[in-house]
Amino acid sequence: MSWNYSQVVAKLKPLRTDLVSAYSSIKLESLPATRVYMKNFIYQAWAVISTLKALRSKLSPSTVPWYPPEDENSVRYINEILLDEETDVAGQPQQYSSHYNLFIKAMREANGFSEPMETLVTDLRQGMAWDKAFIKNKDQYKHIISPSTFKYVENEIGIAMNGDLHQIAGFFFLGREETVPDLFSGFVKSLNEKEVNAPLFKSYIQRHIDLDGDLHAPLGEKITQRVCKEDPKMWKEVYEAGKLGITDDLNFAKGVTKMIGKPLTLYEAVGGRSNLEKVIEAAKSRINADAAEKGLGDEDGRMIVNSLSEDFEGPSYPADQKFGIPKNSQTNLKVALLDEFSGLLANQEDAATHLKKIKTKLSKSFES
């Protein structure tokens, strides 16, 4: 049987229907809920450009000396998509930005938590190998980012790095670009109806509805059709790759839905690493003279934060040595930490509802 792009789309329709249903369960009806979605989706926004780069390199390798690509039309099509994703118009004349950075700006505007994704990018920029950087990131932020988000990224980058051209195209175009307009349309409606104050996020969503539906998906169809031609084996593998992309996104949606409404981890609630360092320093400065006389070291505050790991649930600090702090001094530092945490938490409207539970739970650990 000879397949074509339209037939693969039709064959994937039942799974796409399930995906749309799963996304409709993501209720972006408040800023806290929107932040949960954003801190997970930013991984997808980053992986998109990585996958496009893989497609571009397969269609026209960046070699010197240069030689003409075999399929110049497909190179043109992928360049058009990359032009939007990597250097889109950023709101003002002659200002351009990747969609990844546009989304980071949207997260900051909404007071979202972008540290996990930005940490991964920093590690990669500094030369850390993908496998090592990804494992580190997944371990560091396992209490903050959904496991299904990490699985989606792992599969997409795996295909981008190791898949054949037609498999990468299948995952990206059939597993993502064909589905985005249907998935994001519901978000626009709920964000507007509930008057969620996230204008940059709304702009990002609307931009992708327009681009993916009107331009990127049709270009993706042309590329995939030109690559596979009438090869039945290729079309079967395109279908399987598209199926994997939709299935991973379905699980992503379910994972995000489970996270919405749950209490923030203490690490995220205080704003991550930079604020935590300030909290520790402020708490240390407030402990009594007795603790200072006993030789409270620079790492001691971090050690005590680690002792609250059940509540802390963020990247841990080294605590592989004993510091010999008297029990009463440890308690004083814990109380000071709690006071500092409370001050930060009280300034975040979405954390306020969880503050009492966190304080009660932490206070019990101070008694031991």
Image (cartoon, rainbow, N blue to C red):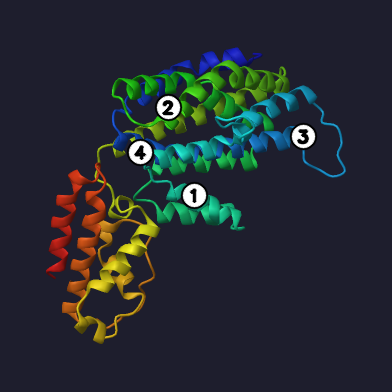
Q: Which is in the foreground here, disc 3 or disc 4?
A: 4
Query: Circle 4 sits on which residue?
Result: 35
Q: In this view, does 24 lie above or below 269?
A: above
- Circle 3 sits in a helix, a strand or a loop, which is it? loop
Say which of 12 and 118 sits in front.
118
Picture quadrant where residue 76 is located: top right
Three-letter amino acid code of the residue under disc 3: Ser
Residue 202, numbered circle = 2
Q: Name the residue under label 3.
A: 60
Q: Is residue 303 left or right of residue 117?
A: left
Residue closest to the far front: 93
Write the residue at 60% across / 40% down. Answer: 50
Cα distance in 3D space between marks 3 and 2: 34 Å
Q: Where residue 329 sits in the image (x, y, percent)?
A: 19, 78
Q: Distance between the residues labelled 3 and 1?
A: 29 Å
Tag 1 near tag 2, CB within 8 Å: no
The answer to whether residue 260 shows anywhere in this view is yes
Question: Taking 219 as reference, is 35 above or below it?
Answer: below
